[in-house]
Amino acid sequence: MIEVERLSKVYEMGEQKVSALAGVDFTIKKGEFVAIMGPSGSGKSTLMNLLGCLDLPSSGTYRLENLNIQDLKPNQLAEVRNRRIGFVFQSFNLLPRASALENTELPLLYGRVPNAKEIALQALDRVGLAHRAKHKPTELSGGERQRVAIARALVNSPAIILADEPTGNLDSTTGREIMKLFHELNQEAVTLILVTHEQEVAQQAKRIIQMRDGKIVTDELNGVESC
């Protein structure tokens, strides 16, 4: 599903060049649950941006479902982000004045998908929030807001879901509930890539990639612990 070869990213800061990613290689198969870990400045967020087609590499190759991402035009990249990638963020990124249903159906509206409300309601039901469809984010708990964000990520049946510190703004009990939901989705063959600095969260994944100084230092299968 994902093939990364010698992927690098260099940022120009004035006269200086900063290497954020230094030639990484890996593959991720359909249905995998992968955690990417590393300290601040390790390159994990840069890698997440590249995998999410939010940025393009300076060199190397990224193929998503046999598409060469670096060869795509901006409008094609936007379509890949909308159709093939679901995003879950630490800060939820929900529209405050929109209901849970309206937030969930946004990717469908951008993609001009028919029957958007019906599909969005099904996605909310999948995360156990159909009964809260009319509530706005301010009327939902942190865990419920993250579930709405996950429903929004799922609504287009994407190839992968990228989750960036998805439990970072949640208490430990709610965080475990969200991780339990990720496990349930993964059991349905949803491919999950999770960026975290929390060891307890990473241990929920089936594979852990450790990064440092823009490079992968370990890439190992993990004996998953129960939520």
Image: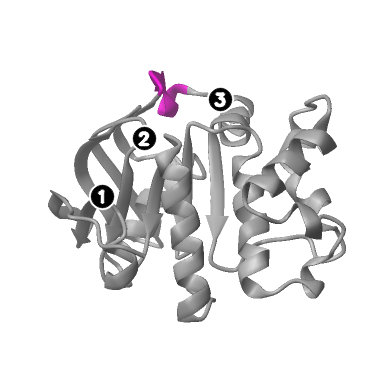
* Element assignment for label 1: loop
Mark 3 touches mark 2? (CB < 8 Å): no
Circle 3 is placed at which residue position? Answer: 73
In the rendered image, the vertical position of residue 146 relative to residue 59, given as above or below: below
* Element assignment for label 3: loop
- Which residue sits at x=85%, y=58%? 98
Residue 18 position within the rendered picture, expressed as x and y whole percent measured from the top left: 30, 59
Q: Which is more foreground, mark 3 or mark 2?
A: 2
Instruction: Identify which residue, 221 or 94, lies in the foreground.
Output: 221
Ranked by sequence position, the earlier of labels 3 and 1 is 3
Q: CA distance from mark 3 to mark 1?
A: 34 Å
In the rendered image, the vertical position of residue 46 relative to residue 64, given as above or below: below
Residue 110 position within the rendered picture, expressed as x and y whole percent measured from the top left: 76, 35
Q: Amino acid at mark 3?
A: Lys
The quadrant of the rendering that contains the N terminus is top left
- Which residue sits at x=31%, y=48%? 34
Mark 3 surroundings within 10 Å by alpha-carbon count, few (fewer than 14), some (14 through 19), many (20 or more): few
Q: CA distance from mark 2 to mark 1?
A: 10 Å
- Which residue sits at x=30%, y=68%? 41
Mark 2 surroundings within 10 Å by alpha-carbon count, few (fewer than 14), some (14 through 19), many (20 or more): some
Q: Amino acid at mark 2?
A: Gly
Magenta residues? 65-71
Residue 215 position within the rendered picture, expressed as x and y whole percent measured from the top left: 18, 53
Circle 2 is placed at which residue position? Answer: 31
Mark 3 touches mark 1? (CB < 8 Å): no
Ranked by sequence position, the earlier of labels 2 and 1 is 2
* Element assignment for label 2: loop
Ranked by sequence position, the earlier of labels 3 and 2 is 2
Whether residue 201 appears in magenta in the rendering, the answer is no
Q: Which is more foreground, mark 3 or mark 1?
A: 1
Circle 1 is placed at which residue position? Answer: 206
